[in-house]
Image: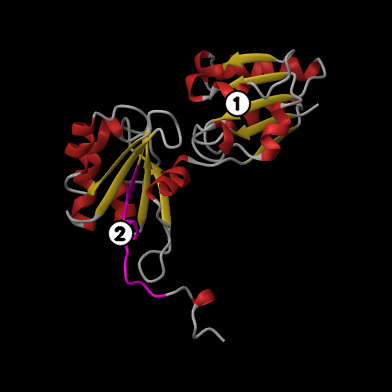
Amino acid sequence: MTVYFVGAGPGAADLITVRGRELLGRCGLCLYPGSMTPTDLLASCPPDATLVDASNLSLGEAVARIVAAHRRGLDVVRLCSGDPSLYSTVAEQMRVLDKEGVPHAVVPGVSAFAASAAVLGRELTVPGVGQSLVITRARSRPGSMPPGETLSNFARTGTTLAIYLVINHLEQVVEELVPYYGADCPAAAVALASQRGEQVVRSTLSRIAPDVRAAGVTRIATLLVGRTLEAEGFPDSFLHSDTNG
């Protein structure tokens, strides 16, 4: 049998992929990321499936349950918030499953940065303004980021940034970015994108921290920074340009 790492999406139950929902519908075991999983999504699992809140399990405990279910001949769905390719601990789990000889597959999902852009109604790659996106996270403690992966290094490129796990470090992040983007650079924080209780704060880089605090945002949020957030008067992309061909 197979272990499926399924992207649950940013929160709304209907933002999971069709493939992901179908796999939920036939799994024998589903491990899900606690309160970040909508109840409606778990309702897609079979009535006799075992549902396990993995938010309080260690990596070893979670993988042990997966391996045991596999050996009983059950398909397993390991739901991941957003998309499994970002901040999901999938790499660590797959490493152990490989050692145990347990087959696995990944089903992508909608990431928080994509859901946040949708909430804002913005494209993050705009012709002549920005054609790149850096997805990173705030440094929570010394040594938590590889050498060279600093906000200042990314900021030197001027590219659009999507910064995860940022709420508790917002002032520090702004201090690092302002010298490169300027105080007036558009910035937006989206908390709980697509979920009940969603909060959106649109501002400038110099004002985003006090505006977020004034709005009372304390939950998981994504910070987007870049000129693409308010781009106007930009040229058509080459693909759709009247001069193409």
**Residue 98 can be seen, yes or no:** no
Residue 230 shows which numbered tag?
Answer: 2
Residue 225 image point, x, y percent:
31, 51
Q: Which amino acid, by three-letter code, is at mark 1?
A: Leu
Asked if residue 154 lies left or right of residue 55, the reply is left
Residue 186 image point, x, y percent:
26, 54
Q: Which amino acid, by three-letter code, is at mark 2?
A: Glu
> 225 above or below 125?
above
Check if residue 228 falls in the magenta segment: yes
Measure the C-alpha gap from mark 2 to mark 1: 34 Å
| Circle 1 residue | 41
Asked if residue 165 lies left or right of residue 34, the reply is left
Which residue sits at x=17%, y=48%? 206
Q: Residues within 10 Å of mark 2 (few under 14, many from 20)?
A: few
Which residue sits at x=71%, y=24%? 76
Image quadrant where residue 208 sits: top left
Residue 135 shows which numbered tag?
Answer: none
Which residue sits at x=30%, y=54%? 155
Bounds of the magenta span?
A: 223-235
Asked if residue 226 lies left or right of residue 16, the reply is left
